[in-house]
Image (cartoon, rainbow, N blue to C red):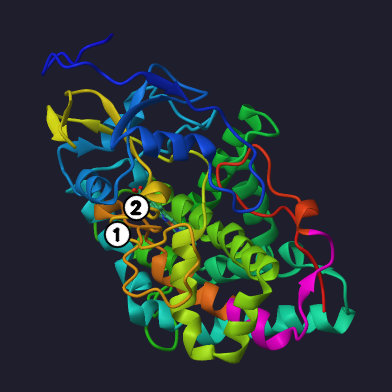
Amino acid sequence: MEVCPVTGRGLPPVRHWPALDLHGTDFDPVLAELMRQGPLTRIKLPNGDGWAWLVTRYDDVRAVTNDPRFSRKLVADHDVTRLAPHFIPVDGAVGFEDPPDHTRLRRSVAPAFTTRGVERLRAKARAMLDELVDGILADGPPADLTERLLAPFPLAVVCELMGVPASDRPKMHEWTNLILSSAQGVERSQRAKEDMCAYFADLLAQPRDDGGDADGVESVLGLLGGAIADGEITASEAVGLALLIQIGGEAVTNNAGNMLYILLTRPELLERLREDPAARPRAVDELLRYIPHRSAVGLSRIALEDVEVAGTVIAKGEAVYVSYLAANRDPEVFADPEDVVLDRSPNPHVSFGYGPHYCVGAMLARLESELLVDAFCDRFPGLRLAVPAAEVPFRRGALIRGPQALPVTW
Ligand code: HEM
């Protein structure tokens, strides 16, 4: 048995965690097994080197993600065991920075993500959503809601937030898909990343309009341009940040696709929300908690010194993953974690992460999800799947899980 070099205690075995193509919102059986094994286990993912620690309990996940003794910056220089075959971080990307640089980068775009910044988008987002729904209704059933609604809507909203012209939306969508999947080859992914970086570098180099919109709120690119001009961030940091926000923006497509899949396969939930609009915001949070948003785990952290977690020492230099999905099912925090309890309250889920890397777009994602749930409930009377649930195709080989298509009728 391997022993811990610090405590001399035995180490848990390393569990291989293969890439699984799961259907619907099925919870990953390997993660369930790891959760049963204990608070701290060791995993080996399909790519990268060696093994990493995995933390699954809610309190431990919050402790690790909020502890400056675990670094994200160091991850960029290590070939840590990981799910993604091709992940090559962009220089200065916010996901791979530690405070104080990380704080400085986040500060540069913060005004776009405050309540006021996000709320300024509400009316525009609703109008864009209405237009898409009008088109679907005009064409009549059946329709693939992934293609017609769940892909174009978050894309339109994030482009609006960024200040990307509507005519460039298809290009952004194509690059995002290529960057997030290596299905068309690692080189194609890398090229898409370079193309998107060049695109943002070009937009940021153009003279900017300082005024913002009618409320004086600037787009993300406007804010980044200002921060470069003020010497707060470098041009390459701005590009890295723009890229992550643009890509992150499309996360709602998959997440809301899972939401709709749950509502369509459990019609009693959809009925409840149709009848009770006031219940929808809380229901959105519960669905966010329940949805297994991603495959396996995301980005690791590396210990800057020996740190004790759940009674075991994570030694300096070792990599550690947290599972937000597992934390969201911790029975110590969530009663009946395997059930969707629409009016669960309080619901302190960690679907948007925790600590300094907490999702930049959380408020925007909530807003979009609420608007989409309103549309499902109010604009499509009799909405139902057009194929048996088992035949709804789910993405394969994907980092983020969700329906490839959602064929519906009404
Ligand atoms: C339902 C949809 C979404 C979910 C479930 C989600 C979830 C997450 C999670 C779990 C993290 C990582 C926390 C960590 O590294 O520990 C994250 C980070 C991030 N998300 Fe989201 N997200 C969503 C939507 C969005 C949207 C709409 C945007 C942009 C408009 C966005 C932009 C980002 C960025 C830039 C980061 C990196 C933050 C950092 O490292 O400081 N996300 N998100």
Q: Which residues are magenta?
A: 373-388
Which amino acid does the dot numbered 2 rest on?
Asp
Membership of 347 in magenta stretch: no
Quadrant of the snapshot with the N terminus: top left
Residue 152 is situated, as x and y percent measured from the top left of the image, at 68, 66
Residue at image mark 2: 330
Residue at image mark 1: 333
Which amino acid does the dot numbered 1 rest on?
Val
Residue 285 in sight here: yes
Q: Are the residues tagged 1 and 2 within 8 Å (C-beta)?
A: yes
Indicate if the residue with disc 1 has its beta carbon within 8 Å of ligand 1: no
Residue 87 is situated, as x and y percent measured from the top left of the image, at 49, 33
Measuring 76% from the left and 78% from the top, which residue is drawn there? 383
Ligand 1: image quarter: bottom left
Q: Residue furthest front?
A: 336
In the figure, residue 43 lies in which quadrant?
top left
Residue 409 is situated, as x and y percent measured from the top left of the image, at 83, 74
In the displayed structure, 212 sits above or below 25; it is: below
In the displayed structure, 397 sits above or below 257; it is: above
